[in-house]
Image (tube, rainbow, N blue to C red):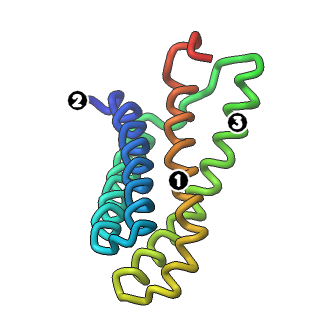
Amino acid sequence: MSVHDLPAVNATLNALSGLLLLIGYIRIKTGHRESHRFWMLAAFASSSLFLTFYLIYHAQVGSVPFTRTGFVRPLYFTILVTHVTLAIVVLPMVLVTLRRGLKGQFATHRRLARWTFPIWMYVSVTGVLVYVLLYRPTWLL
């Protein structure tokens, strides 16, 4: 595997994070606290691995220009700007929400998770979209 394989790996990790988040959400909504904890820690691990590989990739390759034109260009940049902005915002939110849950501070954890979960999910899904729009063939859109 080379550094140029990392975008596909990162998209996979983003998709996996989204799936794990969704499973964790369903588990807590159905009253399975220990299972919820497992799936959310797995989502955190997947997102952490993504961030590590993302930083390695961009330290080696730098910025990748978006060369496509037409309606997809403003779509891409809208998704990219919201994705990056919310990714920056959600990192401390995830850390605090996770810490509160692990410490058993469930009332605070729940209040924070109501904001953290949808933002984290959005960042995971849009991470995959950014990859598809930037690295996949133009016939997809």
- What SS does tag 1 mark? helix
Per the rendering, the mark at residue 77 is 3
On the rendered image, what quadrant is the N terminus found in? top left
Per the rendering, the mark at residue 98 is none
Q: Which badge, 3 or 1, comes first in the chain's sequence?
A: 3
Q: Nearer the viewer, residue 31 or 66?
A: 31
Q: Which badge, 2 or 1, comes first in the chain's sequence?
A: 2
The residue at the point 43 percent across, 89 percent down is 105
Q: Residue furthest front?
A: 30
In percent of width and height, residue 32 lies at 33, 70
Q: Nearer the viewer, residue 24 or 92?
A: 24
Q: Residue furthest top?
A: 139
Q: Nearer the viewer, residue 77 or 32?
A: 32
Q: What residue is pinned by disc 2? A: 1
Query: Are dots 2 and 3 in contact, CB under 8 Å?
Result: no
Can you tell which quarter of the image residue 129 is in?
A: top right
Q: Is residue 80 left or right of residue 121?
A: right
Look at the picture and state if 12 lies above or below 108: above
Residue at mark 2 to residue at mark 1: CA–CA distance: 28 Å
The residue at the point 50 percent across, 32 percent down is 131
Can you tell which quarter of the image residue 99 is in?
A: bottom left
Residue at mark 2 to residue at mark 3: CA–CA distance: 29 Å
Q: Is residue 64 left or right of residue 32?
A: right
| Dot 1 amino acid type | Met
Q: Which badge, 2 or 3, comes first in the chain's sequence?
A: 2
Q: Is residue 38 left or right of residue 18?
A: left
Q: What residue is pinned by disc 1? A: 121
Count of picture labels: 3
